[in-house]
Amino acid sequence: MKKPWPTKVAMEQVYEAKLWGDNGTEFYSGNGSHDPELVQPYVDALKLFLKSFENPLTVCDLGCGDFNIGKKLVAHTQKYIAVDIVEDLIIFNREKFLLPNLEFRCLDIAKDELPRADCAILRQVLQHLSNSEIKNIVDKLCDFKYVVVTEHLPQDDFSPNIDIISGQGTRLKKQSGVDLQAAPFHLKVKEAKQLLSIDSPNHGGCLVTTLFEMF
């Protein structure tokens, strides 16, 4: 049998050991996906973006987690494909969330081919990955028309993209954060627009959401 990828094992352990907290459910993606002060402004901004199109977009949620946020967006899309690396989590979500335009897939977004869609969403996903994995993902983002990225960044000036080992942690302790347009990623986009910035006092820094229109 094929040996599991290190990132897959790390993320499985995050949920098994409840390293992002425990709200009494089998799977919990942490405060960042459940705190109304962090979640509601994001949901409002994404709804506004999605509803701005006469023909609803197909959306690929790359790193859907426990789907507490994604479930609020599905109705505003033509089709919503929710992806995560943790197989048991995807099985759980498939049984819990039953909507006609919703599909769940278990994929390693750094290694596997990504589903076709108009728009990709990556919310607090890249911040947990190594630079090599982020680079692999960046190489695939040009296949989408739009990419919406949310990252936990330091409040003040910081050195972007200091490398980490993939897992539960982020770059904040290194006074760093992911900037896809900076080295070593150099994401090429037609336009970049900040949709939202929310202070995260409990964890320091802020959650910044950026909309990229791709070439």
Image (cartoon, rainbow, N blue to C red):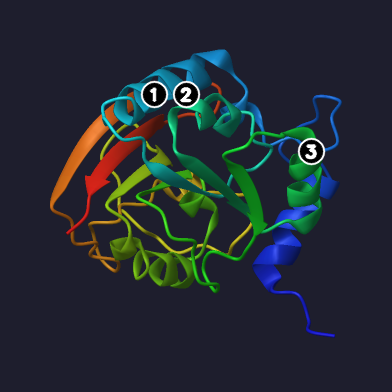
- The answer to whether 209 is drawn above or below residue 158 in the figure is above
Element type where label 2 sits in the image: loop
1 or 2: tag closer to the N-terminus: 1
Within 10 Å of the Cα at label 2, are there few (<14), some (14-19), or many (20+) other Cα atoms?
some
Q: Residue at x 35, y 50 (%)?
A: 118
Q: Looking at the image, which is closer to me, 81 or 182?
A: 81
Look at the image and tell me in which quarter the C terminus lies: bottom left
Element type where label 1 sits in the image: helix
Q: Which residue matches tag 1?
A: 47
Within 10 Å of the Cα at label 3, are there few (<14), some (14-19), or many (20+) other Cα atoms?
many
1 or 3: tag closer to the N-terminus: 3
Q: Residue at x 81, y 53 (%)?
A: 88
Left-right relation of 192 to 166:
left
| Camera-side mark, 3 or 2 | 3
Element type where label 3 sits in the image: loop
Left-right relation of 101 to 144:
right
**Residue 148 in picture, x, y percent from top left:** 35, 42
Three-letter amino acid code at the position of disc 1: Lys
Three-letter amino acid code at the position of disc 2: Ser
Q: Which residue matches tag 2?
A: 200
Q: Which residue matches tag 3?
A: 27
3 or 2: tag closer to the N-terminus: 3
Whole-number angstrom distance, CA of label 1 to CA of label 3: 25 Å
Q: Residue at x 54, y 74 (%)?
A: 111
- The answer to whether 102 is drawn above or below residue 45 in the figure is below
